[in-house]
Structure formats: structure tokens, C-alpha cells
Image (cartoon, rainbow, N blue to C red):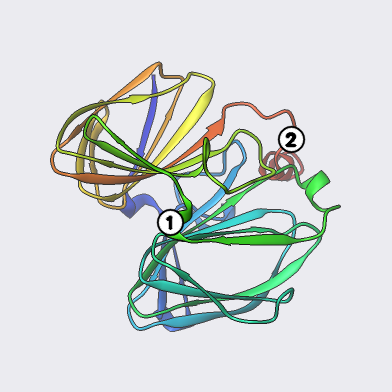
Amino acid sequence: MAITITKKTDQARGQFNGGEILENKPIGFPREGGKLKPYSNLFYWSHAWSDEGSTIGLHPHQGFEILSFVFEGQIEHYDTSDEEWKPIEKGGAQIIRSGNGISHSERLNSGAHMFQIWFDPNLSKALEKPASYNDYRDQDFPVEEKNGMKIKTYKGKGAPLMMDSPEVEIKEVSLEAGQHEMPTEEDKIYSYYLIEGEVETPDGKLEAHDFLRVESESKLSLEMKERSRFFLVVNPKKLDYLSYYESAMANA
């Protein structure tokens, strides 16, 4: 059994513009001191929000695939490719395949909450490609409802979002109160961020903004104390390339 709970209080923290934008980070940058470090091709995961609205200025990226998901309010995006601000509404998403380099800026409008999640697609190959990106609306993603469960698929079967990072699935899962069996495969890692609700797991209670990592499990039983909503990322347990984090640690 390999189930790890990372409470919100044990996650890394961040902020921009004197606290106008705040962050809790289940997986922060290695220097930021949170309990969890990067694993598989999952490098970074931030929940960012702004009560009044604020802008993160123009900054560069290379190599990583950077995905943004809006679950409250609206954000806006500017990059050096199109040179115009574009909105991403609640339920929408964006992928930046940063390739050989792109600079961008983000604006979180008042009341916005978003995830920004970075994936390592094999940087040795990604750095040779030109940067590209795609924006998606809420209605672009398929939704399935069954057995007291509602599943919105961002990356996976029937979803339009395409990535170079291998074997990644990304879903938002809403569950009614009661007992639920979550499907798992032993060669994959399942990362659950509880957006809202209260959940009992085999290793303890989850409250809003707690993080659950599951691997080497044939099944996962969860008891919803109330209607709850997870954001789920699935990654391969083993990669056929050395990740950036593994390489950095080997050379440290």
C-alpha cells in the first residue's frame, strides 16, 4: 500500500505582488520546502487565487508543458507569440508547450482560482521544438455521469487536449456523499487535489485543499462525508527517460 496525504498546512506557499495573488502548492519548486517533491513527469502543481485581481508580469519558459485550469472566475493570458490578451473562463483550460522558448503573462481577475501544473515531456527533446499553445472552453471537454459520480475529462479518452508528456490523464471528479470505489492500476500514480468536501481515506481524513497521492494499489476506497470534488492527475509510475528533477538531483 502506498497512500500519502499532504495536508494544506504541509504544502509550499507562494505569493505575487505583495500578496495580491496567493498560492498553496502540493508540489512546489524544489527550493520551496513543501513535503512533496516532483515525481514521474509531474513537476509542479500550484493552486493560485486572487481576491481583488492582479497580474503576473511577462516571464519566460522553456521545455516544460504548462497547463492552467480555471475553476472559479476568469483569468487572462498574454504571450509573445500572439501579443494579445485572451480570456480563459471558469471550466476552461490552456496548455503551453514551451519548447525552445516563449514568454507570457497572466492576469487573475477578481475572485479567480486556478491550478497551474507543469509536466516534463522529456526536456532533451522538447527544447528542440518550437513553442505552441491551445486554449479550451468548458464545453470542449466531455462529461460522464454514472453511479453518483460526475467525471469531466481534460486529458484522456474523448478529450481534445494533446500533450507530449506520455501517459497523462487529467480529470475533475465530483462524487455524491457515500462510499465510492476509485479505479486504479498498479503501474500508475494517482494524484488527487480535494477542491471541496470532506473525505475519509484508508489513511485518514481529507479536507478542502488537501492532496492525496496513490500508487501500487489495485483499488482505492473513499467515503464522501458530503458531496465532494477532486482534481485528478494520473501519471506513469516509470518513465522511459530521465526526468529533469531526477537529472538535477543526480548532478547536485
Q: Amino acid at mark 2?
A: Leu
Earlier residue among tags 2 and 1? 1
Residue 109 falls in which quadrant of the image? Answer: bottom left
User: SS of the residue at dot 1?
Assistant: helix
- The residue that appears at 27% across and 29% down in the rendered structure is 203
- The residue that appears at 82% across and 45% down in the rendered structure is 125
Q: Residue furthest top?
A: 218
Where residue 126 appears, as percent x and y from the top left, is 78, 49
- The residue that appears at 51% across and 81% down in the rendered structure is 55
Q: Which residue is mark 2?
A: 242
Where residue 95 appears, as percent x and y from the top left, is 60, 57
190 is higher (above) or lower (below) than 142: above
* CA separation in Å, label 2 and label 1: 36 Å
- For label 1, the crowd category at 10 Å Cα-Cα, with few meaning under 14, some 14 to 19 and many 20 or more, is few
From the viewer's perspective, tell me whether residue 92 is left or right of residue 65.
left
Q: Which numbered tag is attached to residue 139?
A: 1
Q: Residue furthest right?
A: 128
103 is higher (above) or lower (below) than 83: above
Q: Amino acid at mark 1?
A: Gln
Where residue 35 appears, as percent x and y from the top left, is 44, 46
Q: Which numbered tag is attached to residue 32?
A: none
Q: Quadrant of the C terminus?
A: top right
- For label 2, the crowd category at 10 Å Cα-Cα, with few meaning under 14, some 14 to 19 and many 20 or more, is some
